[in-house]
Amino acid sequence: MWYKETVGIINTPRPINIDDIQHPANIFTLWSKEELKSLGIYPARVESIDSQYYTAGLQTSEIVDGEYVISYEAVERDVEELKSNLIKSIKENTGNLLAPSDWMIIRSIDEGKDVPSEWTTYRNDVRAYGNTLEKGVEAFASLDAVRNFQHYEVQEEKYIPVVSDGVQTAGSETEIVTVVVDKTYWGWPTSPDAEVDEYHVRYI
């Protein structure tokens, strides 16, 4: 993308007439920035905003270090709407986690068979955790609180992989890695039939 004052934004290479001289489209790919600048053509870019949390406001544009930069005022999205969307996602995740074991409840109603205690505990824990998250979100008073919830930094201790005879397994030594998680989907109770991550030791 390029910019010329008398033309505006040029999205793709095309023939262009400057001072009654017709230039072919390939000048945009073959010429250097300095050669294009001699014709008043500058590389252009748009500084995007984080649309998850902001909408685009007033547009400004300027040439910075030989580049035409278009930017927008970042207008905060409505916090209550963001909170409502978060709570909706938490409820959906609660349902998604419970759904695979719903058949046990149906069987217990239809056939009178007991639901294994570990599954009853798990299902109760999922509901309790979801309710806790929802109450926490309801208390948010700022956009930063929403953003930090969805970009939460945690440290994980993991076993360092080792390779023996072409097979990778968890070694005995550990390392600490920093990961960014969305708490909407992180930290939930683990189902009784979940596969164990052999590399995970703990979250710090």
Image (tube, helix red, strand yellow):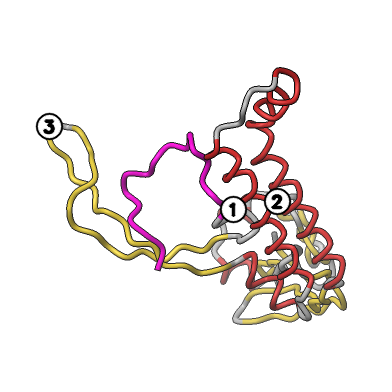
- The residue carrying pointer 3 sits among few (fewer than 14), some (14 to 19) or many (20 or more) residues within 10 Å by Cα, namely few
Q: Which residue is mark 2?
A: 13
**What label sits on residue 29 in the rendered view?**
1
Residue 9, compared with residue 94, is above or below; it is: below
Return the x and y of residue 123 as percentages of the image width and height. 63, 43
Return the x and y of residue 105 as percentages of the image width and height. 69, 30
Residue 158, compared with residue 56, is above or below; it is: above
**What main secondary structure does the magenta stretch of the protein show?**
loop
Marks 1,2: beta carbons within 8 A: yes
Start-end of magenta stretch: 188-204
- Element at badge 3? loop
- Element at badge 1? helix
Image depth: mark 3 or mark 1 in front: 3
185 horizontally vs 40: left or right? left
Three-letter code, disc 1: Thr
Residue 185, compared with residue 81, is above or below; it is: above
Three-letter code, disc 2: Pro
For marks 3 and 1, give the CA distance: 50 Å
95 horizontally vs 59: left or right? left
Which residue is pictured at 49% across the width and 38% down the height? 192
For marks 3 and 1, the one nearer the N-term is 1
**What label sits on residue 165 in the rendered view?**
3
Return the x and y of residue 138 as percentages of the image width and height. 79, 70
Seen from the viewer's position, the closer of residues 155 and 4 is 155
Task: Residue lying at the far top in this picture: please name it.
Answer: 111
55 horizontally vs 64: left or right? right
Q: In the picture, which quadrant includes the N terminus? A: bottom right
- Element at badge 2? loop
**Residue 18 falls in image quadrant:** bottom right
- The residue carrying pointer 2 sits among few (fewer than 14), some (14 to 19) or many (20 or more) residues within 10 Å by Cα, namely some
